[in-house]
Image (cartoon, helix red, strand yellow):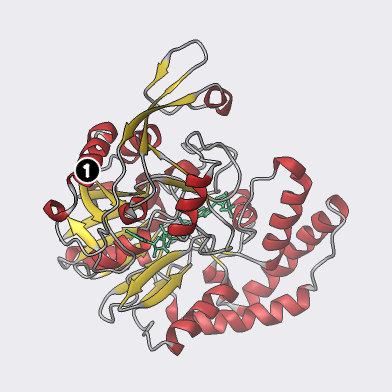
Amino acid sequence: MSASIVVGTQWGDEGKGKVIDILASRAQVVVRSQGGNNAGHTVVSNHQTYKLHLIPSGILYPETKCFIGAGVVLDPKDFIGELDEMHKRGVSTENLKIDPRAHVVMPWHITLDGLSEKFRGGNDIGTTKRGIGPAYMDKYERCGIRVGDLIRPEIFAEKALSTGTLKNKIITAVYGGQPHDLQAIIEEYTAYGKRLAPYVADVSVLTDEAYKAGKTILFEGAQATLLDIDFGTYPFVTSSHPLSGGVTVGTGVGPRMIDEIIGVAKAYTTRVGKGPFPTELFDETGELIRNKGGEFGTTTGRPRRTGWFDAVIVRHSVRVNGLTGLAINKLDILSGIGELKICTDYQKADGTLLHHFPASLEELAECTPVYETFPGFDEDISNCQNFNELPELCQKYIQRLEELCECKICMVGVGADRCQMIER
Ligand code: GDP
Ligand code: IMO
Ligand code: MG
């Protein structure tokens, strides 16, 4: 009987999918608590790559139960596409369950995501345009449609008609966009509801029962700490709580269940979309990291912005998530790129050092990163199986990250495959 959370510590895409897949081999239940198909989690097993958006990353283990919690926003069309893809590849989804409280992403959410981004002009957030923000807005406005409604055709038709009518007014009158054909949507989504019905079950109850039966539970975070609606770089964030604290709210379990909280980081930093990024690189090194690291979005294919490891943001993540350990991925990508830098603190124009990530973007804009420099390494480390096999310089780099982040590094990733992970 144990429960662990895995969360992102930077701006997403740290390799959470890979860490979940590895830890899922020792768990019986994997639960998603927030976000939606804005997430893209990659699992590589035996040279086969799986890109998961809503389905939890434990799905490749046939015995593992995979749950989608109440805090997730679910696009049924995309979800069914993912189900079909899994079935085509011989992956069973028999153990997959969705909480009826999860909110449904409707077509007008996607339309409004696009229109509001356009309205923001040069100040756009750079969202994934998956309708995530507008779906969470309706949830908190208390006019959202939940999975439990979607599977009841009459209730769904009534709610879709009333919300859809209002949304069409906003789309046309405020943004000058094209209205949706509500009857066509009701027909299409009622069919999705039928397809989803067998998967719907109370995830809070199922997770609790599994825990009491002595099972190991793994909570899969999506997005990341610096994209958190409160503790991220607001407003350049997502509309949910990717923090460890969000997990218990988003799945309906108590915080006393949690034993371990693992934060995932890359050995450098990346970000997709707009917003501040103090250690961003605009030179050939940044380009080299992007190309070597395959830094292109799993969900949207957009090139990811790249930069040096920023210990200020990871320290912030250690604190706000209460991390018990860190997994550092993609150390292999730093081989052969020359001298390495780590940002240890930020410095303000008046010379003051900032040890903690500031709350306001205005204060952040005044900061420049303070770097520590390391000689580079050229060895291919992708076959290293334990920490002592790593070149001395890599070991020192990891040890320094550990000191600066004030958290134990328990895993080091040296390749995308599930077998390319060094555990300490
Ligand atoms: P997530 O959203 O946090 O699950 O991460 P993504 O899947 O969006 O992006 C991480 C990318 O890095 C994926 O393509 C992974 O296959 C890859 N990856 C993860 N860990 C490692 C690693 O240690 N080395 C290398 N080379 N690739 C990795
Ligand atoms: P995973 O789980 C990286 C970013 C978007 C945008 C901002 C808001 O794969 O790490 P949204 O569509 O959520 O309203 O967009 O958040 N974003 C992510 N960036 N990885 C993700 O998920 C992301 N999910 C959202 O690029 O900047
Ligand atoms: Mg991703």
Q: State the residue in front, 46 or 170.
A: 46
Q: State the residue in front, 322 or 363.
A: 363
Above or below, 38 against 352 in this view is: below
Quadrant in which residue 330 is drawn: bottom left
Ligand 1 lies under 8 Å from the Cβ of mark 1: no
Q: Position of residue 341 (x, y in %)?
A: 37, 36
What residue is shown at x 54% (from left), y 64% (from top)? Answer: 299
Q: Secondary structure at mark 1?
A: helix
Quadrant in which residue 372 is drawn: top left
Name, please, the residue furthest toward the top: 350
Q: Position of residue 226 (x, y in %)?
A: 46, 41
Above or below, 174 against 187 in this view is: above
Residue behind mark 1? 393
Residue 266 visible in the snapshot: yes
Above or below, 372 against 125 in this view is: above
Which three-letter amino acid code belongs to the residue tagged 1?
A: Leu
- The N terminus - image quarter: bottom left
What residue is shown at x 25% (from left), y 80% (from top)? Answer: 63
Q: Position of residue 249 (x, y in %)?
A: 39, 50
Q: State the residue in front, 29 or 40.
A: 40
What residue is shown at x 76% (from left), y 79% (from top)? Answer: 184
Quick check: 82 left or right of 23? right
Residue 424 visible in the snapshot: no
What count of labels does the image hold?
1
What residue is shown at x 78% (from left), y 47% (from top)? Answer: 119
* Disc 1 residue crowd, few under 14, some 14–19, many 20+, Cα 10 Å: few
Quick check: 167 left or right of 284? right
Q: Position of residue 342 (x, y in %)?
A: 36, 35
Q: State the residue in front, 295 or 81.
A: 295
